[in-house]
Each structure stands twice: as structure tokens, then as C-alpha cells.
Amino acid sequence: MSRPVRHFLDIDQLDTATLRTLLERGLAYKRKTLADRPLVGRTLALIFEKPSTRTRVSFEVGMRQLGGEVVMLDAQGTQLGRGESVGDTARVLSRYVDVIMLRTDSIGKLIELSNNASVPVINGLTDRSHPCQVMADVMTFEEHRGPITGRIVAWSGDGNNVAISWIHAAARFGFELRLACPASLQPPPALVTWANAHGGRVSVTTDPQAAVRDADCVVTDTWVSMNHKDRTERINLLLPYRVDEALMALARPDALFMHCLPAHRGEEVTDPVIDGPNSVVWDEAENRLHIQKAILTWCLDVQAPL
Ligand code: CP
Ligand code: NVA
């Protein structure tokens, strides 16, 4: 019997043991202890419906480092942009490539792609989540501070796609996550309920000071994501959630600062915080490369021994 296709769609879709293996392998790739070119002869298609710097470069460089090839597809330059269905695109691409990464404005398209592809599909960001990013973030936390289980992570800002992947991670890795978001920009309550029923300790408040107090890590993200149109309204709502030195001072003295980037300096974070000694934003960006190499080899079931 053939094995089911291994998609990497969201952190909540995988069990803790698998996620831990990915972290371990991401670290091994960073330390260069895994076989160098296990994906010779394999091809990754990268589909972007939205802009990207980190995801685009880290997937392309990572796949090449693993010995594989990359095909870059800008949705507007393909028939997808002219209305060919995602399902038909999935069936066709599955005949050409071995794995597909999609960055899209709609979780529905990711699901349609994975339901119709006979090769693994990786979520490179949707309006709903950004699992590759948060796997890199958990890896970064653990490199700097040891196991994240039982620690306190505070989120101050929009309850957006990255926040949702943090909620998934809180359940799977067993840490406390305190989200401070304006009332109208909070993550779905059902998701918080799910996380708390599955090993997380997730709370939502409108008070950033309360969320950040004694935290081991403070995280934020842009106030205006790629799928948002209401810039002025959002900025007005989110001003009290800016991560500045006064807010960081409420966290533990060694609290890390994280941001998936791109940052909007002076909006969600000030220069002294993002450029400060506790900021690990460049490590997060680097770790995208390493964790995605672990994700690619896991999806293709090519596991070099550790
Ligand atoms: N953090 C992140 O995904 O960045 P890009 O939008 O540049 O890919
Ligand atoms: N929340 C941001 C993340 C960018 C990497 C967005 O969706 O635009």
C-alpha cells in the first residue's frame, strides 16, 4: 500500500513528535550534520499569489542546497491568474514536480490544491496562517533559551495569520501564549478554545501591558497584512500595541523580541527594540532556510540519518 502524501499545511495538523523531529532536523541542517544533497532529481514548484522576500529566497536556496531544482510561478504569469482552477493546476503540476509550495490570499485555495495534488503541498502563508514562519520562530526561541514548553510568549498587535500559527504552536509545544489585540482584531475564539483543550495555555486580552508582564518572549507583526485594505482604521486601533522599550521593560529582562518581518519600523515596533540586544529577528529569518529544508525532506520522506 502506498503511503499517504505528506502535506505541510498547518502546525495543528501534525503531532508534537513530528514537529519535534522537524525542529531537530532544522537544527541539524543549520549545523550541517545532515547528508548534503538528498533531493537530487527532485523539483519544487513555488507559487506566489502575493509578494515575498524571505519565503521566496529561503525555499529556493534551501531546495538548491538539498540538490533539487526549483520552478518559480508567479500566479499572474500563469493560467491560474486567468481563472484555471486550483484543482486543475494541482493535477497538472503533480505530473511535473515533486512538491509544491503555495503562498495565497485564501486558505480555501491551499486546501483545494492539497486535495487535488498527488505530491506534497507546503503552506507558504495564507490569510489564515504561516506555519513555516512559526516553526522557524520556535526553533529560534529554543536555540537562544532552551525548551519553549512551559515558557511564556506574549503577542502584541493584530490577531492575524502569524498569531494563529502561534496559537497552533502553543498547543503542540505546550507553552503559555498571551495575545493582546484590539477587540475587533482578535483571533477566532473557537481556535483559542481548541488550543486550550489540546495542551496550550492561550489567553486573549486587550491589554498589552498585562500580556507582556514577565514574558520570556514578545512577538509582534505588521499592523497591515497583505490581505488588509483598511490601513488607517487598523493603525488607529493598533497604536496602543506598539512594542517599544517601555513595553519590553515589563517582560523578563532577558525576554527575546521576535518579528517575522517585514517590519514597519515606528509602527508596530520601534528601532531600539528591533535593533536591541534581545532582538532575534535576523535569526528567525535565517532559520526559515533550515527548518524548510527539514520540512521539504520530511514531505518527500527522504530522511538522512541525524
Ligand atoms: N516572513 C515572511 O514570510 O517574509 P516574506 O513575506 O518576505 O516571505
Ligand atoms: N501578517 C503578514 C505576514 C507577512 C510575512 C502578512 O500576511 O502580510
Image (spheres, rainbow, N blue to C red):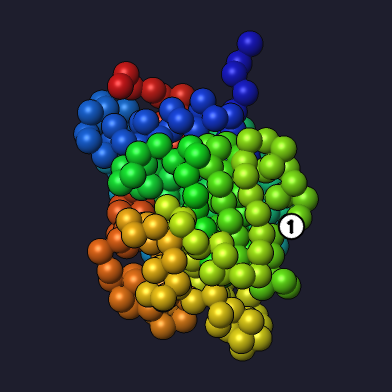
Q: Tag count in the figure?
A: 1
Q: Nearer the viewer, residue 90 or 296?
A: 296
Indicate the quadrant where residue 65 lies: top left
User: Could you say where residue 113 lies in the image, as x and y percent from the top left?
Assistant: 65, 45
Q: Nearer the viewer, residue 216 or 121?
A: 216
User: Could you say where residue 159 lies in the image, as x and y percent from the top left?
Assistant: 63, 64
The extreme top residue here reads: 1
| Rendered view: 276 above or below 252 | below
Instruction: Identify the image quadrant of the N terminus.
Output: top right
Residue at the image position 38 percent from the left and 47 percent from the top? 141
Q: Which residue is mark 1?
A: 188
Residue at the image position 34 percent from the left and 71 percent from the top? 273
Instruction: Identify the image quadrant of the C terminus.
Output: top left
User: Could you say where residue 50 lies in the image, as x and y percent from the top left?
Assistant: 53, 66
Q: Nearer the viewer, residue 192 or 2?
A: 192
Side (left or right) of 192 relative to 5: right
| Rendered view: 111 above or below 57 | above
User: Could you say where residue 205 lies in the image, as x and y percent from the top left?
Assistant: 66, 64
Amino acid at dot 1: Pro
Residue at the image position 54 percent from the left and 69 percent from the top? 209
Visible residue check, residue 79? no
Visible residue check, residue 144? yes
Other-residue count near label 1 (Cα within 10 Å), few / some / many at <14 / 14–19 / ≥20: few
- Helix, strand or loop under label 1: loop
The extreme right residue here reads: 190
Side (left or right) of 299 relative to 198: left
